[in-house]
Image (spheres, helix red, strand yellow):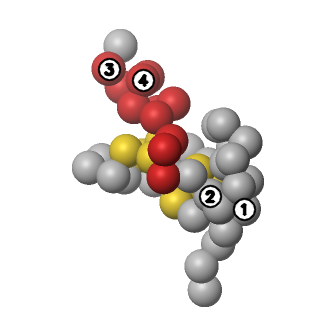
């Protein structure tokens, strides 16, 4: 079953990816496919 909803970062519809670190449901624009995490977690990892 696929989970689809509103992106928890930008608010866009069709969020279908789950961050493996924080569990946020995010859209493809807010998801880092190479790491399997959301852009918010990616930003925290870079710092």
For mark 3, give the secondary structure.
Answer: helix
Task: Tell me if residue 47 comes above or below residue 26 in the rendering.
Answer: above
Q: Is the Cβ of the residue at disc 3 closer than 8 Å to that at disc 4?
A: yes
The residue that label 2 is drawn on is 15
Q: CA distance from mark 4 to mark 2?
A: 19 Å
Q: CA distance from mark 1 to mark 2?
A: 5 Å
Task: Tell me if residue 41 comes above or below residue 47 in the rendering.
Answer: below
Visible residue check, residue 25: yes
Q: Is the Cβ of the residue at disc 1 closer than 8 Å to that at disc 2?
A: yes
For mark 4, give the secondary structure.
Answer: helix
Report the mark closest to the observer, 4 or 1.
Answer: 1
Mark carried by residue 43? 4
Report the residue at 65% width, 61% height from top: 14
Q: CA distance from mark 4 to mark 1?
A: 23 Å
Q: Is the Cβ of the residue at disc 4 closer than 8 Å to that at disc 1?
A: no
Report the residue at 62% width, 58% height from top: 15
The residue that label 1 is drawn on is 5
For mark 2, give the secondary structure.
Answer: loop
The residue that label 3 is drawn on is 46
Report the residue at 73% width, 42% height from top: 11
Q: Is the Cβ of the residue at disc 4 closer than 8 Å to that at disc 2?
A: no
Q: First in sequence, mark 3 or 2: give its number.
A: 2
Left or right relative to 44: residue 23: right
Q: First in sequence, mark 4 or 2: give its number.
A: 2
Q: Is the Cβ of the residue at disc 1 closer than 8 Å to that at disc 3?
A: no
């Amino acid at each position: 079953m696929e989970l689809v909803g509103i992106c928890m970062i930008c608010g866009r519809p069709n969020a279908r990816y789950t961050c493996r670190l924080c569990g946020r449901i995010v859209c493809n624009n807010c998801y880092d496919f190479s790491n399997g995490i959301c852009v918010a977690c990616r930003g925290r990892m870079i710092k």
